[in-house]
Structure formats: structure tokens, C-alpha cells
Image: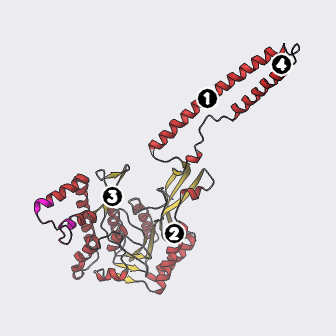
Amino acid sequence: MAYGERKTLIEELEAKRNSKIITLVISDRISTATFQGISAQIAPDQILQVIEHLKLFTEKEFPLDKIELFIYSRGGDINTAWTLVNTIRSYTSVFNVLIPMHAESSATLISLGANEILMSKTATLSPVDPTVANAFNPKENNTSLGISVEDVTSFFKLAKDEATVGIKDEANMTEVFNSLTRKVHPLALGNVKRSHTQIRLLSKKLLESHLEDGERDHIEKIIDELTEKLYTHYHLIYREEAKVFGLTNIKDADVDEEKLLWAIYKDYEVEMKLKDIFDGNAFLGADNEKVLETTTVFIESTERSSAFKVKQKLRRALNPDPNHRFQVLINSKQFSSTTTNLKTQLLNIKTNATTVNAQLAGLIAATPGLNAVSASLTAINTQVDTLVRDLKEDLDVSDLKMFTESIVMEIGWV
């Protein structure tokens, strides 16, 4: 479906929920190589787009007693989650989240700020322990590695665990810490601690934004579960488990809500090709280059459609390793130089053959046997012309172009 058909589904869900709805759908499409325009994350630039929708609501004088965010995302920037919730809350007294499938990491954080979290049977939340990255993180192949907060804390728990290492002596624990700092820059570890503190603080503030005094007893338990006790960031939390550790504002979608949530999600899934693995070589097929246009984020309401689009040119290329490309370049230049020298030698042979043939011309009448020699020299010239014509000055590296690279042509919101 296009936006027009989705708009009808959103209107139906609004009528059912007696609310105004904004959708935030962010691509989690898988790619065999890293390209822009395939997947995305929750990010600060999405806030302005949401504001544009909220302003249209107020201009149309819609009742804004309840604004709901239909969300599908694997996560992203945690600070954006805080800003987004507070932005929407500045326009309404009730903010709800509607989850058809995945609302993980930063999307879970957004959900913590909702008065009600409506979850379908397939909806999932996740832990909110962040993976942090900054200039001091370890690097591998010139790429900065993310550090999971839980990986660091688990490292020290492992050292103290009596069933495994069982270190108790303070001096030995100091050495454990020192061994870690020899592998990971101390400032990167400091960033891990700061992020861990921040995520707990944001979680608490978001929960306090809507829970009544009598409901706040479970806040620390909820935060512990989401930041520390589930041990892996990839654990999917379905609605029944979420209720168990204290999210009392979880609501099960009824039959009609379930159908509408699923219909809207499936439409986005098809348009954004969320279930199709993107392969650059398969996309190019027999072509050496082709233009790819994709949408990684949709923010929509009944008033407008906002889409983050990427237009890029994909083309076959050499291995991205600089050393490999440099070696191919050197070989190409050597090939070109060798070809040029060979052409020069062949043209010299042709010149000499032509000179000899001209000298023979005056002798052939007296010595008919020289006709055969002249014919041979003419044949040599013909062969030389063919060789010179067929010699390529540039090395053909098409068989070496096994990778696909991207040149971004246009990018941004439309």
C-alpha cells in the first residue's frame, strides 16, 4: 500500500482508540554489507519531524487528550528517547505507545515514558543496557568497537564469582581492573560507567513521569531488570514477562486492535522490504552500476507522511582494503607502461619492414624471387597493425571487482 491506504488504517485505529496517532517505523533490514539506506536507528533528527505532525494536530484543532505513538524500532540514541517523550507530552495529558512487533532498546526506553503500553501478541521490549562508543574505544580493522555496559560489569562479576574465579583479595581485584585498562582505554571505561548511570536515571525519570506515588515502589525493580538482570541486550521481553517484573501499564491489544496493528505494520514491512536481505551484488546483477533508492524511516499521521530517503549509486569495485587497491593500481601502471613499450617496438618493426620493402621495390624487376620477401614484409606489417590495435593500454580489472561500493547522491527527509 501507499500512504493513502495506510492513512485509512491509521484513521480506523484512531477511532478505535479515541486518540491521535503518529507512527515511527525504522528499518531493521539486514544487508550482506554495510550500506547507507538499508537500516536506521532512533535519532535526534526524527524529533523535528514528530513536532511537524504535532503542530498540524493543533492547527486542525484535533482533541489532544490522548496522543499515541505506533512504534517499530530496534533502538538507537537514548537521549532522543527522553526528548521524544517529553516533546509529545508537552502536547497532551496522556501519551501511549502502540507496539505491533519490536520496540527494543531505545524504543523500550520511549515505552517506559508512556501511560499505557499497548502490546500485540507478537510485540517485544528489550533490556535498555547501552552499548557505548567514543574516540577511546578499542579498534579493529580501523573500526571502533562498541562496549556493552553489561559486558564490563559481568567481567568483574566473573572475577568475584566463587564458582569460577572467586577473587576476594582487594589487591587481586586491582590487578583485574588493571588488566582490563591495558586492553580498554580508561576513558572508554569511564564512559561505560557514565552511560550506565545515565540509562538508570533516564529510566527512572520516564517511569516517574506517569506513575502515581503508590505505583512507584516497583521502579527500582523494573530498572534492575531492564539494565542488569536479563544479562543480554538481545533478550526479547514479551508482554507477560514485562508484567511480571512490574510494568503494570502493559495492556493486551484486543482482537480488533491486534488486526489493525498488524495490518499497519505489515504494510510498512512490505514497502520497506524489512524481511528482504539486501545483497549489493544481487541488486547489480549483470550491471556494473545501478541507482538504489530506499526509505529507512517513516513518521506518519493522518495529516502527512514524512520519510527519510536515501538515493545512492552502487557500483562494482575492488576490495576496499587500501593496500589491495594500491597494489592493483601499481600493477595497472606497470601493465600500461609495458604495453606502451611493446607498441613502440612493434611500430619500429613496421617502420623497418616498410623501409626494406621500399628498397626491394627497385630490385624486384631484376630479381623476381624477391616478390616473396616483399609479400612477407607486407604480411608482417599487417600483423603488426592488428597487434597494435588489439593491445589494451589499461589492465582489465573487471574480474577483480568483487565488492560493491556506494556513492550517495541524495539523502534526507521528504
- Indicate left or right for 243 with 189 as reference: right
Q: Which residue is mark 1?
A: 340
Q: Which mark is residue 146?
A: 3
Question: Gap in Å between the C-alphas at discs 4 and 3?
Answer: 82 Å
Relative vertical location of residue 154 with respect to residue 319 in this rendering, above or below: below
For the point 79% across and 14% down, the residue is 359
Q: Earlier in the sequence, mark 4 or mark 2?
A: 2
Q: Which residue is mark 2?
A: 275
Question: Gap in Å between the C-alphas at discs 3 and 1?
Answer: 50 Å
Q: Which residue is mark 4?
A: 370
Q: Nearer the viewer, residue 237 or 404?
A: 404
- Indicate left or right for 174 with 269 as reference: left
Residue 328 percent across, percent down from the top left: 51, 40
For the point 41% across and 59% down, the residue is 45
- The reply to whether dot 4 and dot 3 touch (C-beta < 8 Å) is no
Q: Earlier in the sequence, mark 1 or mark 4?
A: 1
Picture quarter with the N terminus? bottom right
Question: Gap in Å between the C-alphas at discs 3 and 2?
Answer: 26 Å
- The reply to whether dot 4 and dot 2 touch (C-beta < 8 Å) is no
Task: Give the amino acid at mark 3.
Answer: Gly
Q: Is residue 167 magenta?
A: yes
Report the magenta residues as a range: 156-173
Question: Gap in Å between the C-alphas at discs 4 and 2?
Answer: 78 Å
Q: Nearer the viewer, residue 126 or 342?
A: 342
Q: Which SS class for mark 4?
A: helix
Residue 266 percent across, percent down from the top left: 52, 74
Q: Which mark is residue 61?
A: none
Q: Earlier in the sequence, mark 3 or mark 2?
A: 3
Q: Earlier in the sequence, mark 4 or mark 3?
A: 3
